[in-house]
Image: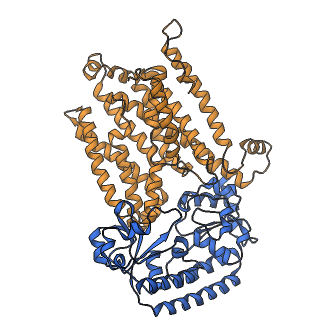
Amino acid sequence: MIRALALIAVLAGALPAVASDRIVSVGGAVTEIVHALGEGHRLVGRDTTSTYPQAVRDLPGVGYARRLSPEGLLSVNPDLILAEQGAGPPETVDLLRTAAIPFVTIPDGHDRAAVLAKIEAVAAALGVPDKGAALAAEVGAALDAAAAEAAGGAGPKVMFVMSVQGGRVLAAGRNTAADGIIRLAGGENAISEFEAYKPLTDEAVTLAAPEVILMMAREGAADGADQVLDHPAIRTTPAGRARALVRMDGLFLLGFGPRTADAVRELSAALARAGS
Amino acid sequence: MVAISPDSAPTVQGWDRGTQARRVTLLLVVALGVVSVFSLTVGAAGTSPWAVLADMIAGREVALADRVVLFEIRLPRLVLGALVGAALAVSGAVMQGLFRNPLADPGLVGVSAGAGLGAITAIVLGGLLPAGLAAALGYYAVPVAAFLGGWAATLVLYGIATRRGRTSVATMLLGGIALGALTGALSGILVYMADDAQLRDLTFWGLGSLAGATWAKLAAAAPLMVLALVAAPMLARGLNGLALGEAAAFHIGIPVQRLKAVAILTVAGATGAAVAVSGGIGFVGIVVPHLLRLATGPDHRYLLVNSALLGAALLILADVISRIVIAPAELPIGIVTAVLGGPFFLWILLRKRGVLDL
C-alpha cells in the first residue's frame, strides 16, 4: 500500500514539475554555480563543503556530502536536491526517491569542459537553461583567456601538498583536482607516478624536485610556511631552497566551479612570481 | 540505570539478588518502551507519530514525507537499534562468561577484525567486481563482505584453537591477537590503496551508524541476531558452571565443549550481522554487562536477559542523540556511545572500586 502510493508519487515527481524553490545544494562548486546563476535565493540547505559565497553559511547544514542523513534532508522540506558526484549514501538517495523528492547528480571533472558541463547541468535542473548557457559561455571565455595568459608562463614543476602531518608529505598525483588546476595554470605536476593523494617518502619528494609547493590555505592551519618549507625533504628541493610556497583557498583552487578562471589566473601569476 | 543505585543487595528474606534482578528486568522493559516511543517521536523532521496515527485511524491521507519519515526512516532505525544493541550486549556478556575475562568482547573471537577487513575490501575493491554482481549487490556489498569476513575469521580461529574435539580458550585468545595483527596489516594495504572518498567512507564506517537502516537490510540481518538472543538464555546455566573453571564445570555435568561451540558460533553470527549493518559501534558489549554485574551480580540467568534489554535501550537512546544533536546533520553513533559510555563507566568504577568481579 505504502509502496504503491510511493510509486505513484515517484511517477508524479518525474513529470515536469513547477519550478522548485526549496533546494538543498550538496557540494561547494554546485552551490557556487547556483549562486552565480542568480538563483541563490532558492536554496534552503547546504552541505559542509558549501562555504561560498558568504550568504550560504547561514543556511542549515545537512552534514557531510557522503553521509547525508535522510531525515535531516527531509526536515528542511526540500523539493529538489542538487548533489555533486559521489554524494550519498545510496540508502539515503533511495529514501528520497521514495519520498518523491528529485535528486539530481551533477557530473564532476577537472578540466574546462567539466566546468561548463557542471554549469549547464545545474542550470537545467533549476529550469534556467538560458542563464546556464550564458554563464557557461562567459566562464568558458574567461577560462580560455586565463589559459592563454598562463601558456606564456614558465611552466614550473609544482607539487600540491595536502598536508605534512607527522612529517609525512601527502601529495596529489594524477586525476586529482589539484593536478587539473596545475595544468590549467600552465604548470607541470611534479608527481605523475600515481593517482589520487598519497603519502610520499622523503626520497620521492627530493626526486620529484618541485620548483613550487602549492597548498590550501586553511583557517587556523597549524602547518605554517616555515614548517612546510623546513621539512627535511622539501628543504632539499628547488622549491625549498627558493622558499617558493603558494597557498590558496581550497574551494577556490580545487572547486572547479564558476571561479575557476580566476583561480587559474591567480595561480599562474603566483607560479610566475614564485618561479622568478 | 536506576539499578545502579543500591550499593549492595542485602540477602534478607524476599530481597535476594534474584528478586532484585527481576525488578531490574521489569524496569528495563519499561525503559525500553519509553526510549522506543521517544525514538519514534523525535527527529530532525517535525513529524509526530501521534498525528500520523490519528490520521490513519480516521482514514485521512497522510503526507508522503511524514509517512516516509515514520515508516521508512524512524521505525526501521528503532528496530535495528534495538536488535544491534541487544545482540552486542548479549554477545559481550557471553564472551566474558566463556573466557572468564572481564575484558572479553566479541572482538576476541576475531569477528570485529574480520568484519572490518571485509568492509574495507568491499569499499576499496568494490569497483573491481564484475558489473553484474556489483549491480546485484548494490549497497549491500559492504554489509555482505563485512559479515562474510567476520564469519571467516571466527571459523579460522575456532579451527586453530580446536584440537581433538577440544577448544582451548587460551589458544583462541592468542590466535585472535595474531589474526588481528594480520587482518590489520591487510586492511592497512587497502587503506593505502584507497582514494580520498573511500578513506572518508572507511572512517565513517568505523564510527558506526544506524542511518542506513532499511527494511531489506533488517530482514537479512535480524534472523542471526534474534537466533543469538534466543539461544543465549539456554547458555546461562552452563556459563554459571564455567565460572568455577572448565574442569569443575565438566565434573558437575556441563557439556563444556558443546557450550563453547554454541556460544562462539552464535556470538560470531550475531556480532557479524550487527557490525555488518551498523559498522563499528564500540563499548556496548563491554559496558552493559559490567553495569548489570555491578547491580545484580554475575548470575547469567538474569545477566543475559538484562544485558539484552539494557543494550537495546542504550543504543536506541544513543541513536536518538546522534540524530538530533547537530540536526539536520547527524553524528556517527559510535562517537555518542563512547562519549556517554566512557565517563559514565569510569564514574561507576570509581564508586565501586573493590567490588568488581565476574
* Residue toward you, B122 or A60: A60
Horizontal arrangement in the rendering, residue A92 relative to residue B285 (left or right): right
**Residue B120 in view of the camera:** yes
* Residue toward you, A105 or A179: A179
Relative height, residue B34 to residue A257 (above, below): above
Badge count: 0
State which quadrant residue B313 falls in: top right
Residue drawn where x is 37% and y is 81% of the image = A211
State which quadrant residue B99 falls in: top left
Residue drawn where x is 48% and y is 89% of the image = A150
Q: Which quadrant of the figure contains the C terminus of chain A?
A: bottom left
Horizontal arrangement in the rendering, residue A4 relative to residue A113 (left or right): right
Relative height, residue A24 to residue B68 (above, below): below
* Residue toward you, B134 or A204: A204
Residue A188, horizontal then vertical, whole percent: 39, 84
Residue A163, horizontal then vertical, whole percent: 41, 66
State which quadrant residue B151 falls in: top left
Horizontal arrangement in the rendering, residue B102 relative to residue A185 (left or right): left
* Chain A tint as drawn: blue
**Residue B227 in view of the camera:** no
Task: Say how the picture is coloured.
Answer: by chain
Residue B110, horizontal then vertical, whole percent: 33, 43
Relative height, residue A92 to residue B284 (above, below): below
Chain letter for orange, please: B
Residue A180, horizontal then vertical, whole percent: 46, 80
Horizontal arrangement in the rendering, residue B311 relative to residue B243 (left or right): right
Residue drawn where x is 49% and y is 22% of the image = B295
User: Extreme top residue here?
Assistant: B13
